[in-house]
Image: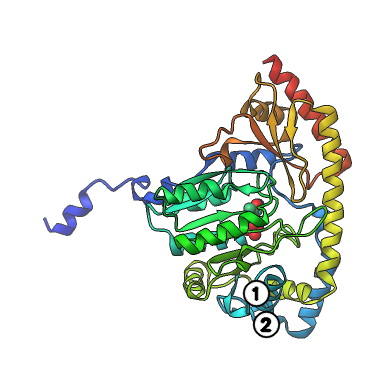
Amino acid sequence: MSPETHAEAAAPASIESLLARRTGWGRSDAVSRILAAAAAPGVLSMAGGIPAPDSFPVARLAEATDRLFAGSAVRALQYAPTDGIAPMREVIAARASATGAPVGPDRVMVTAGSQQGLDLVAQTLIDEGDEVALDDPSYLGAVQVFRRAGARLLPVPGDADGMRTDVLEQRLLAGARPKLVYVVPHFHNPTGAVLSEERRRHLAALAERFGFLVVEDDPYGDLAFEGSRLPSTDVHSGRVVRLMSLSKTVCPGLRVAGLVAPAELIGELVAAKQCGDLQTNTFGQYLLADLLGDPEFLPAHLAGLRTLYGGRARAMETLLRERLPWLEFERPRGGLFFWCRLTDSRVGSDALYAHALAQGVAIVPGTPFCIEEDGSRVLRLSFASLDDAQRREGVSRLATAWEKALAD
Ligand code: PMP
């Protein structure tokens, strides 16, 4: 019998046994289950960070589409450079410079959402066992990316001013050597915290001293209900990667976001993207370059969003305080979420989640966001995508869920 025939005769390996080790590191069934439940017919969702459908600039996008097709449709349908079309990189560079350190398009890349930006950063910088410091609780999409890249997570506690950089410093002095420190600098998902100016300076100084990179993921910075945003940490240090999502401020479906990176890193990130998808969709880039290239568009559009979400947050706060006195929370100053604590020890957030779903309203219990913190008494509620009637009905269903959970 030839060696080939002998090998063929052996029992084939199971498909599961072929999976790469990393597939076991970063998969959360909890998240998929929660999102699927929230999408079930008849369920009012306070679960996902879904922007209000009535906030999308539909007419303006239709105009940009007509203009694009009247000019040269072929441009929008052709392959484009991996780092993005020039007009899109230019508008991202201009926006980045207006909200942080001045930067040219040469340090900008267009990504398929900030989620891809996060993944590219992790793939490019993290080897198995490398440390990544991040808030606890943190955006669960980031936790999954870093886990799947093989990172050891270094959770850092926070408060209303964001990550406790004093605690981070203690850990660094005690020998921790993260390659990356991941922050959501405005209206953190899920806690709503804003990283204070003082802590941005401190974080930047630590990055310079200990040599890590700050990954600043900022989808909510333009959604302050009052006042303005703080400058990016990159005004204090060159060791910052900025992820500039457009999902909450224009729309998520086009999958176009900006990434700004130090000159030494941008080429490697582009190489990683080339392996993944060659480029971000050309059509979406031209549309968004048209909108953002119009100096009138963004200021007016953002003003409308702040009014819409600020109003929805106030209406939600009033209802929660009236109808759900067993919830404790800080009033959000921007973004899309209420981060709430259950004050009555008889019911935990997982039990409330299950009862809420049975009543037809979806929430997110705290556990999937938490790394070392106890998530069993916290939960996240999004107020963004429900209109007045849906919000009243959703809160009413939550009140019933609470009664049922108590009686259980
Ligand atoms: N980062 C954070 C903190 C988010 O909340 C989200 C979306 N919920 C993302 C990144 C992903 O954004 P994008 O749609 O741009 O991929």
The front one of 280 and 1 is 280
Looking at numbered disc 1 in the image, what kind of residue is underneath it?
A: Thr
Instruction: Give residue 161's position: percent from left, percent from top.
Output: 66, 48
As drawn, 211 above or below 69: above
Q: In which quarter of the image is the C terminus?
A: top right
In the rendering, at what x and y percent does residue 276 appear? 50, 66
**Dot 2 and dot 1 residues touching (CB under 8 Å):** yes
Left/right of residue 301 with respect to residue 266 in the rendered view: right
**The quarter of the displayed image where residue 360 is located:** top right
Number of the label disc, if any, that sits on residue 75: 2
Residue 360 appears left or right of 165 = right
The quadrant of the picture showing ligand 1 is: bottom right
Q: Does residue 106 sit above or below 37 in this rendering?
A: below
Find residue 282 and name its label.
Answer: 1
Q: What's the amino acid at mark 2?
A: Arg
SS of the residue at dot 1? helix
Task: Return the residue found at the far top.
Answer: 407
